[in-house]
Image: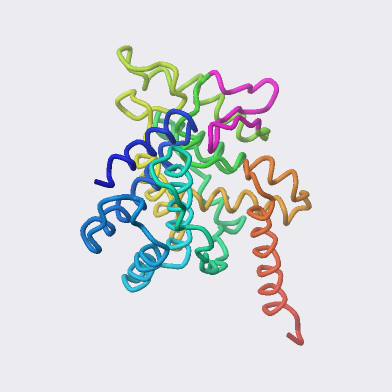
Amino acid sequence: MLKPALDEFLHYLQVERGVSENTLQSYRRDLKNYVQYMEKVIRKSAWNNISRTDITGFLHKLKDDGKSSSTIARAISSIRSFHRFLVREQLTDHDPSIHIETPKKERKLPAILSSQDVDALLAIGGNTPLDIRNKAMLELLYATGLRVTELVSLKVSDLHLTMGFVRCFGKGAKERIVPLGEIAKKAVDDYLRFSRASLVNKKQDKNALFVNQHGRPLSRQGFWKILKKLAHDSGIKKEITPHTLRHSFATHLLENGADLRSVQEMLGHADISTTQIYTHVTKARLKDMYQEYHPRA
């Protein structure tokens, strides 16, 4: 049986490594398919019997199923981590994932909003508690570039409005401090003063910063639905996800002269090469503007 080792690995990731729930789900999804392939397709029953050819067969199946190179690369990363764990725990005596080539990822530029689109999205009218909450959430998200999971995980105690910053915990539970602008500070302050108390149910957790209409902590899915409706109401035609505001935050900072290291720090990227994708976005936008406006373009 192969599955018990997978359960041990997932427990190790959750308890000892302290990975986020999203990361844990990604590992679980990738490796569940991997284990099922080994057990049901090629009939392997012990990790010692897994060979490099078996792994490449699984990867070829992913490709035949139409999976993108980025999905396959992520699966390889999960498989490598898993086999290193198996060797370390002496559940097998060899690592067949060594020297498996990772497919080159397609360099896909992230979708961003123009400054005009951001202004339209953030022009939220209305004075109901939910309107005030929505204004605060979007202003905070665009002002900080937080991931949506980081946003909905914020506690009231994570805010330091007088000092002008917010504390969040990103991937791997890494803490970082992100500055807040005056507009976002005012929007969040208005939410705390005029809206949140009327939404929080006395029986619910009072620590969560953003709550739904029932007083419970807002979920990622709940925020996505709110964002989708607000984008539609703003007349924005392009597809928007919560990450679109994060991409826009980074791109607009760089376009206005921010240095790459500072943007990396605010986004919580471990590797600056991840942040460098936004320099390609700004160059692409410059080229588009040149083509549109230069008389001899």
Magenta range is 157-177
Out of 277 and 88, give the one closest to the viewer: 88
For residue 260: magenta? no
Q: Position of residue 89 (x, y in %)?
A: 43, 37
Residue beneath the point at 55% across and 61% down: 110
Residue beneath the point at 40% across and 46% down: 92
The image quadrant of residue 57 is bottom left
Q: Is residue 277 above or below residue 18?
A: below
Q: Position of residue 169 (x, y in %)?
A: 55, 31
- Residue sitting farthest toward the bottom: 296
Out of 188 and 106, give the one closest to the viewer: 106
Out of 293 and 170, give the one closest to the viewer: 170
178 relative to 239 in the view: left or right: right
Q: Is residue 19 above or below residue 51?
A: above
Q: Quadrant of the C terminus?
A: bottom right
Q: Position of residue 259 (x, y in %)?
A: 78, 49
Out of 195 and 71, give the one closest to the viewer: 71
Q: Is residue 101 above or below residue 90?
A: below
Q: Position of residue 43 (x, y in %)?
A: 22, 59
The image quadrant of residue 175 is top right
Residue beneath the point at 42% across and 43% down: 86
